[in-house]
Image (cartoon, rainbow, N blue to C red):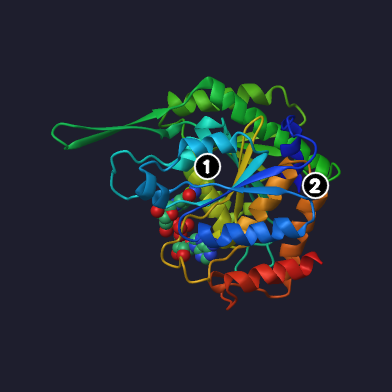
Amino acid sequence: MTTDRALAQSHNNVQKGRRRIALIPGDGVGLEVVPAAERVLAALGLGLEFVRLDAGWETFRREGNALPEATLAALRQCDGALFGAVSSPSQRTPGYSSPILGMRKALDLYGNLRPAQSAPVDGCAPGVDLLIVRENTECLYVKQERLEQDGRRAVAERVITAEASQRIARLAFEQARLRREARDGVGRSLVTVVHKANVLAVSDGLFREACLAVAQAYPDVEVEEQLVDSMAYRLVREPQRYDVVVAPNLYGDILSDVAAALTGGLGIAPSANVGDRFVLAEPVHGSAPDIAGQGVANPVAAIRSAALLLGYLGEHEAAGAVEGAVRRALQKGAATRDMGGALGTDEMTAAVLAELG
Ligand code: NAI
Ligand code: MG
């Protein structure tokens, strides 16, 4: 809710008329949860046009490219995209590179927004409502790795730039403002800057300085800093105290899985990759090969990701309706296996659709 309104502000190029949404299921449970989210999107009666596109490991095996040029070209003709997940080979595979990283780069999706809110689900921490803003383009994800000394020494480069750090910080502070607006000004607005500058004084030092410099332009938002290890600790101990958390790529990746665990699990955790002109929403989870193809994957993370996508497109009412339907379905006890329940993917989707009315 708060996040989607914020997203829409940065999205100036939404065309009027029929919106074209790319659906990229990918691999594994992506093939099950994206069609489930499509059913929910279609039920809203917004006249969305869906375009199915290929990417992922199976695409690589078929075509020798995990992110075909045709997929990228078609994506550029869309207003936004919903992505499932892809399987990545655990060993280096010549010619293979991650399509999600490729899409983030090609479409300049520099921020990854991962909201975590308490859900009416067993084991969920109460009163949590935070947003992790993860830098999405650099850090260790530049994947500059090499072996030295006859393979006895491995080196990975970690890149942090002032420009990327400033723009992710601006996104975080804007989000803090918009979240406060959505709360009608109630509550504290806080941006927590996560780093490890006591050890990585140069790279995390640059990230930290960029964030604190941007903070000057937002005197109405409190800022604090937290070392990533103590952040992990405090996030588990008192998740309720956080509002917006901004972090370099890897820390954000890890902390958002922690936040997901605290607020109902990977099966229901959504995210959105955003740039200034495009959004690619995706569940936080991966392709879950252990349960793929069994019809038991939880579709809620994908459905809630679709709600984030709608918000970015300015469809706040529809986004709120989807979030509300999910919440009511969960409140009534609808649960898939990962949540301790017995519903399959289709039944869970039906439970959400029933609440949509
Ligand atoms: P994972 O997120 O696929 O699975 C972790 C655990 O959560 C598994 O026990 C799985 O069964 C469960 N889980 C995940 N999604 C679920 C859902 N919708 N419903 C119920 N249970 C669910 O992470 P893992 O096992 O580390 O990675 C599997 C594959 O996914 C790997 O190839 C990895 O590279 C890829 N991956 C892809 C991502 C992406 O496309 N953005 C993100 C994370 C992993
Ligand atoms: Mg992850």
Residue 239 locus on image (x, y percent): 62, 53
Looking at the image, which is closer to me, 297 or 198?
297
Name the residue furthest right: 184
Residue at mark 1: 252
Q: Nearer the viewer, residue 268 or 31?
A: 31
- Residue 229: x and y, percent? 47, 44
Seen in the picture, residue 240 relative to 154 is either above or below; the reply is: below
Q: Position of residue 338 (x, y in %)?
A: 53, 70
Q: Amino acid at mark 1?
A: Gly
Give the alpha-carbon distance from disc 2 to disc 1, as whole Å: 26 Å
The secondary structure type at the circle numbered 1 is: helix
Q: Residues within 10 Å of mark 2 (few under 14, many from 20)?
A: many
Q: Is residue 120 visible?
A: yes
Which mark is on residue 316?
2
Q: Is residue 206 left or right of residue 10?
A: left
* View extreme (bottom): residue: 342
Quadrant housing the C terminus: bottom right
**In terms of sequence position, does the residue under pointer 2 or pointer 1 come before the other?**
1
Q: Residue at x 68, y 46 (%)?
A: 309
